Structure formats: structure tokens, C-alpha cells
Image (cartoon, helix red, strand yellow):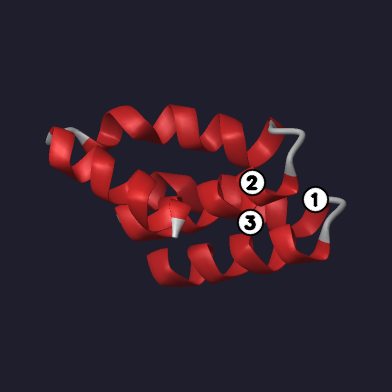
Amino acid sequence: SSANAIAELAKAIGRPSDALPVLLNLVQHDPVSGMRIAAASALGRLGDHAAVATLEDVEKTDSQTLVRFAAADAAAELR
């Protein structure tokens, strides 16, 4: 999946924390719901607990149900 690819790319680069701000921006602001879903999933796979608050916010506020579910799943992975 694209989420796995994003997470693996960040890990392969050796600095997954560099991907965090990009993914946080995507999950909150990308106009394409599929990209927000992929970003949420990638955040869960990266394992950085700093993403939890943003994912919880997206879970509550995103206009698309599938994005909210992806954010909830990712936040649960990080807790």
C-alpha cells in the first residue's frame, strides 16, 4: 500500500522523524481523502507518539468517514 511505502521509505532514509511533519501536514490538509488515509496509516507505522494528538484531532474532525477510521486506527497503533 502507499502507506507502507511511505513509512518504509522514511525508515530506509534512516530518519523517520524527518517524515513526521510532512505526514502530519498531509493527514490534516491534503484535499484528496486517499492521501489523508495513506498519511494516517504511515504515521501509525512510523511509530512516533508525537502524532497521536493530530491523529485524534483528524479522527474527530475530518469530513470523510474512512479518513476518520484510518486516523483512529493509527492513533491506536501508537498508544
- Label 1 or label 2, whichever lies nearer to me, is 2
Q: Secondary structure at mark 2?
A: helix
Question: How packed is label 3: few (under 14 Cα within 10 Å), some, or many (20 or more)?
Answer: some
Q: Amino acid at mark 3?
A: Glu
Disc sitting over residue 62 in the figure: 1
Q: Badges 1 and 2: C-beta atoms under 8 Å apart?
A: yes
CA–CA distance in space, label 3 to label 2: 13 Å
Query: In the shown orientation, is residue 29 left or right of residue 45?
Result: right
CA–CA distance in space, label 1 to label 2: 9 Å
Query: Which residue lies under the disc numbered 2?
Result: 36
- Label 3 or label 1, whichever lies nearer to me, is 1
Q: Give residue 62's position: percent from left, percent from top.
A: 80, 50
Query: In the shown orientation, is residue 41 left or right of residue 57?
Result: left
CA–CA distance in space, label 3 to label 1: 10 Å
- Label 3 or label 2, whichever lies nearer to me, is 2
**Dot 1 or dot 2, earlier in sequence:** 2
Question: How packed is label 2: few (under 14 Cα within 10 Å), some, or many (20 or more)?
Answer: many
Question: How packed is label 1: few (under 14 Cα within 10 Å), some, or many (20 or more)?
Answer: some
Q: Amino acid at mark 2?
A: Arg
Could you tell me which quadrant the N terminus lies in?
bottom left
Residue at x 67% of width, y 50% of height = 34
Disc sitting over residue 56 in the figure: 3
Could you tell me which quadrant the C terminus lies in?
bottom left
Q: Give residue 52's position: percent from left, percent from top.
A: 50, 53
